[in-house]
Image: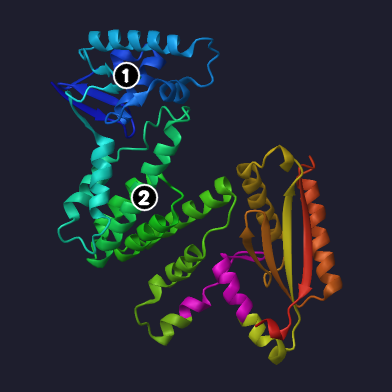
Amino acid sequence: MEIKVFMFGDFKVLVDGVNIVEKLSNSRKNLDLLEYFLLNKDRHIITSDLFDDLWIGDDCDNPEGTLRTRISRFRADLTRAGLKGAVVTGAGFYRWNPAYDTSVDVFEFEEVCKKVEHCTSLRGCEEDFIKAFELYGGDLLSNTLSNSWVVPKSVYYHDLYIETMKKYTKFLEEERRFNEINRICRKALEIDPFESELNLMLMNALIKTGKSQEAYTRYEYATGLHYSYLGVSPSEEMLDFYKNLIRVDRNSEQDIDNISRELAQTDESEGAFICEYAIFRDIYKVYMRNLRRLDITIFLAVITMGDVNRTQGEDFTILDKSMNEFCDMMKDNLRKGDVITRYSPSQFALLLPTVNLTTGQVVLNRLKDKFNEKFPSGRFVIDYKLKPLIEYQV
């Protein structure tokens, strides 16, 4: 008899090609026991560990007796499913029958990942990288994560997969195999869409294969996830990538007439200029270098949006939506020369040239009034700080 077990993603146990999980699925406790025994198939499981891991919260006067009854029913159900004798008993322990030829994807995966740990190139290692990529069909027992004993194991294998795929894609990058990087990263990012390094690797591969617009779409999606669900700003590497992205179409030489025509194209948008923080930082540097020469005054403003319900737990999705709406409002109510950037999940930074402290405060108070009109519920409030830029800040 051949038993093949798949625990990444959907749980399947194939006995001579037939999935027996469906035959046991009428009882959640049966599935819990089957998953537990298979994930611990090479060790003796003492009765107290088994009960504590699986049913510690159950109200039970006689846990050992209850466990014996459950194991007895479980064995009977296994027998009806074609696995008679799959669970054996020793002195104070249970274990999966070692006489059964049982292969488990989890252990195969862990073995190949350990084999590639010390690889310095794809030479002699690529088959193992491919096997690890193919074996990991999703997070461990993804439909069973309500069980506390599964969580640490799931996190361990998830992290092992991500680190292995990072190493694999770096080696692929050294060989300039960008289409394969695209394929590997897309699958890995379906499992962990927040992984910055793999997002960057994918976006770089898209640029290298002439898909800069798709790279930009991916950039917007990745940064949006960070703001909306994690409530954090994108990494410094992500911001630097954006600057490289907007340069990608500027690498070929152009004559001065073409450049002049491109620069002369009319900017029909009204209101303030909205940009990524990486661009905002460059504009700031240009302004700072011209403060004395042009004899101008520039103020930096930071506007913070607060959630008065934060004690009940922040909802970053609602906060992000409100921030986006407020950004549109600021664009419509500030001048063309003003610059806006999203600095953090709850903050905007503004550059306000040719204002003084009084007029700057007037502008920001007007924004506060319009904000209060748009969000009359009072759930979100804004506050601002305003200070002049001075030369030594260059």
Q: Quadrant of the N terminus?
A: top left
Q: Residue at x 78, y 65 (%)?
A: 385
Residues in magenta, as a range: 261-285
**Residue 300 x %, y %:** 72, 71
Q: Residue at x 39, y 43 (%)?
A: 156
Say what amino acid the circle numbered 1 marks: Ala
Q: Quadrant of the C terminus?
A: bottom right
Closest to the camera, between mark 2 and mark 1, is 1
Secondary structure of residue under mark 2: helix
**Residue 53 x %, y %:** 45, 26
Residue 162 circle label: 2
Quadrant of res 375: top right
**Residue 327 x %, y %:** 66, 56
Q: Which residue is mark 1?
A: 91
Image position of 5 with respect to 194: above or below = above
Furthest residue toward left: 1
**Residue 16 x %, y %:** 14, 21
Q: Residue at x 22, y 22 (%)?
A: 97
**Is 42 in front, or is 159?**
42
**Is 32 in front, or is 63?**
63
**Is 362 in front, or is 344?**
344
Say what amino acid the circle numbered 2 marks: Ile
